[in-house]
Image: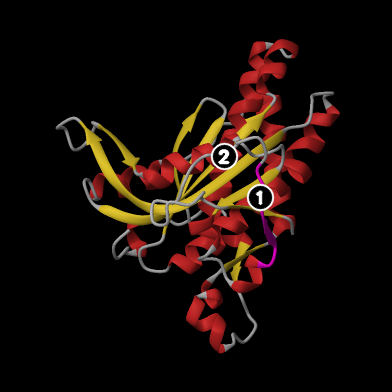
Amino acid sequence: MSKINESDKPKMSQKDTVSNEQSNPNVLDVLLGKNEQKIVDFDSMILETQKRIWGALKQGYEYVGITDDSEKFLRKNVFAKFDMIALYVDLVGSTTMTLELPEEKLAIIISSFAQEMASVINLHNGYVLKFVGDAVIGYFVASNNGLLAADNALSCAKSMLAVIQKGINPILNQYDYPDLMVKIGADFGQSIVVRYGSNPDVSHVDLMGPAMNIASKIQSLAKPNQILFGDDVYRKLHPNNQILFKEVVWKNNEWKYRSRLSGEIYKVYEYIG
């Protein structure tokens, strides 16, 4: 996004679970924007997740303001172009759950999952673009600081796994429901804000660009609970985070997409922690 005024984005309801780094940054961290990265209090995040999941299963808890900030941002910047990181998170095994669970319980689980993922995106200074079936699409504006956006996207992806494994699944297990697993993919590139219709207030707004498409393709090839980043995102990560990844070696022509710049097969990296 071009210059973003923080006042344009609503304050996060989870702000009490986020704190700035307290350690003194070195020169490299300052240059890379590492000192601006947010640290999530995982214990508080997990506790709040469990409270909401309990509420959803017992009385259909409804979440508030999940996509409002994105809607406002996009409408304010129709036809503008922004460097951004697109992140896709998709629920694994929802077809099996459809066959095994009552419709009303399935709806609550998938809805709660999607909204918890959206909550994690907001917590990490990202925007929630939309829900597509049992997938959630988020984005992190990188026009001002691509390095910070990349690190925030990685922290977001890791938090998603933590929320599912330590927050959602323990509650589902108590009801004998199956564990949830996800596939996460992300890519970096320029996207344009588009509006479908002439009414600035109600016409549908969306994002269009190569990063949105490639992130979707990357996510589709991820394994359960695997985080995959495209090369353009990987190159923007802080060096301390880059060493936590390894390049994916594709077999049997699983991956055919080529770099728009070099023409070579576009590299994808797996987070190994």
Main secondary structure found in the magenta portion: loop
Helix, strand or loop at disc 2? loop
Q: Nearer the viewer, residue 168 or 228?
A: 228
194 to the left or right of 100: left
Q: Give how far across and how far down residue 159 sits, in percent.
A: 66, 52
Q: Give how far across and how far down residue 111 sits, in percent.
A: 58, 28
Q: Nearer the viewer, residue 77 or 58?
A: 77
Amino acid type shown at disc 1: Val
Q: Which residues are magenta?
A: 243-250
8 to the left or right of 168: left
198 to the left or right of 264: left
- Whether 51 is among the magenta residues is no
Residue found at x 56% / y 81%: 29
Q: Give how far across and how far down residue 86 sits, in percent.
A: 46, 48
User: Which residue, given by chain and number where applicable, does mark 2 sit on?
Assistant: 255
Residue found at x 57% / y 28%: 134
Is there CB contact under 8 Å for labels 2 and 1? yes
Q: Is residue 13 visible?
A: no
User: Which residue, given by chain and number where applicable, does mark 1 sit on?
Assistant: 248
Residue found at x 71% / y 57%: 42
Amino acid type shown at disc 2: Trp
